[in-house]
């Protein structure tokens, strides 16, 4: 597992080869990456030297799109960056917070503002997923989940956006409903005050034999 | 403050305004509903305490789920009361619904420190404690509302509207939870609403 394993997105759907070699206080990683986009986002910043690509705003950027590229990184050792915190062969479940909707089908499993417990799917399940997109939320362990820095979630071998029955306006609608309800309750309360006063007067009149 | 303080009598199954009219009873119901909003928000904060954005969102989500599900159940309950209940007592039914929700959210708020503690100190037990609290809240809410109606002297006729309200609110609660999710940091079967619970 090298730092380039942190290069996420569609790149890792293609075969990626990593080879690490210790050199003094550093580890030199040679990685082969499928260049499916000019820039491939990194989950964590690379702190060491990088050859074969440039690092731009937490992404590895290449001169040419297509084919594969060999990237060499020289990372201080030991280095926490060697641990890929957001890329994992999920053994059981992983907690992912704050995923945002990214309108990009290419990314595969993309979702709105949700927390997920391991929404990964096996590549073989893609067909079933297409038939019933809601099934995408059935958690499967042992599947790789990739989280890119802007919050999108991608799962290996998965295509298409996931729909869970909620529109982007759901939250706004709920807030409006709650606000409207509270306003209505306030209005009703004020109205009931008048009614209650009348009831009290009526009760007093009845009590004193005037009604 | 006094008006809100009297709400706690509802939890004990006592009518706070027994001698007063329908208007004041309905005012009690509204005060109980507003208090429930506050208590539900406290639970939301605790349940989302591991993620500031989740906690912030829960400030409106949990109250929305509680209030809107209660409102959804109200028309069916009123109809059931009209069909099976005694002639009088509509306002008592509304108060019982509000009191049930008040008691339920009070349980949630009371258990919030525990929920926050487990969410921030345990890798697994936060969610079970949070979900268990909801189960306890539902039981207390149903018991509290039912006892209040029973003491109002409505007899068997009041049990049907109460049962209708309970069932409809639970069904609505499930779907509003789905619409408002995520409320807990974990994905639960309730996040998918009825689809998650019965169609897995």
Image (spheres, rainbow, N blue to C red):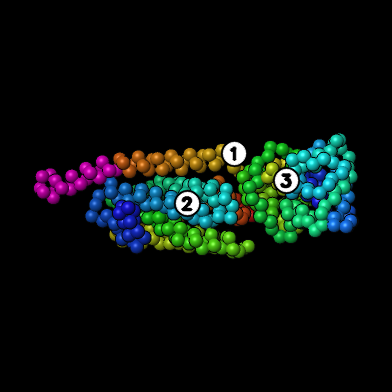
- Residue wearing tag 2: B41
Q: Nearer the viewer, mark 2 or mark 1?
A: 2
State whether residue B46 is above or below residue A205: below
Please give the residue where the numbered disc 3 appears in the rendered image: A148
Q: Is residue A151 left or right of residue A5?
A: left
Query: CA–CA distance between discs 3 and 2?
Result: 32 Å
Q: Is residue B74 above or below residue A180?
A: below
Is residue B181 in the magenta section? Answer: no
Residue at figure coordinates x 72%, y 45% from the top left: A148
Reading the image, the residue beneath label 1 is A168
The tag earlier along the polypeptide, 3 or 1, is: 3
Q: Residue at x 46, y 43 (%)?
A: A178
Secondary structure at numbered mark 3:
loop
Whether residue A78 can be seen here:
yes
Q: Residue furthest front?
A: A24
SS for dot 2? helix
Position of residue B68 measured from the top left corner of the image (x, y, whole percent): 46, 46
């Amino acid at each position: 597992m090298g730092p380039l394993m942190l290069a996420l997105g569609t790149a890792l759907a293609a075969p990626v080869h990593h080879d690490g070699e210790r050199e003094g206080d550093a580890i030199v990683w040679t990685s082969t990456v499928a260049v499916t986009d000019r820039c491939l986002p990194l989950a964590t910043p690379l702190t060491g030297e990088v050859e074969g690509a440039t690092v731009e705003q937490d992404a590895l950027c290449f001169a040419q799109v297509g084919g594969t590229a060999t990237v060499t990184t020289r990372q201080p050792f030991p280095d926490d960056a060697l641990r890929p915190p957001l890329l994992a062969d999920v053994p059981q479940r992983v907690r992912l917070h704050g995923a945002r909707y990214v309108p990009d089908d290419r990314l595969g499993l993309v979702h709105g503002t949700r927390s997920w417990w391991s929404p990964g799917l096996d590549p073989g399940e893609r067909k079933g997923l297409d038939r019933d997109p809601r099934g995408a939320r059935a958690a499967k362990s042992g599947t790789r989940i990739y989280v890119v820095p802007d919050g999108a979630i991608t799962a290996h071998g998965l295509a298409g956006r996931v729909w869970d029955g909620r529109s982007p306006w759901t939250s706004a609608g709920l807030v409006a409903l709650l606000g409207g309800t509270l306003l209505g309750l306030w209005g009703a309360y004020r109205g009931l005050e008048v009614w209650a006063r009348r009831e009290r007067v009526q009760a007093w009149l009845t009590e004193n034999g005037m009604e | 403050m006094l008006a809100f303080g009297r709400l706690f009598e509802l939890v004990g199954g006592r009518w706070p305004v027994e001698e007063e009219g329908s208007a004041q009873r309905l005012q009690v119901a509204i005060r109980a509903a507003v208090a429930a909003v506050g208590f539900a928000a406290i639970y939301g904060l605790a349940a989302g305490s591991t993620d500031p954005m989740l906690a912030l969102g829960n400030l409106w989500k949990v109250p929305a789920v509680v209030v809107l599900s209660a409102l959804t159940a109200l028309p069916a309950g009123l109809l059931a009361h009209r069909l099976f209940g005694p002639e009088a007592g509509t306002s008592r039914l509304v108060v019982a619904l509000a009191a049930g929700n008040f008691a339920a959210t009070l349980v949630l708020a009371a258990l919030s420190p525990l929920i926050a503690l487990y969410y921030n100190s345990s890798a697994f037990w936060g969610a079970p404690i949070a979900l268990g609290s909801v189960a306890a809240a539902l039981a207390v809410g149903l018991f509290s509302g039912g006892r209040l109606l029973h003491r109002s002297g409505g007899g068997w006729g009041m049990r049907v509207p109460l049962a209708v309200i309970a069932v409809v609110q639970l069904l609505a609660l499930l779907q509003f939870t789905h619409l408002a999710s995520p409320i807990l940091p974990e994905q639960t079967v309730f996040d998918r609403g009825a689809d998650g619970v019965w169609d897995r």
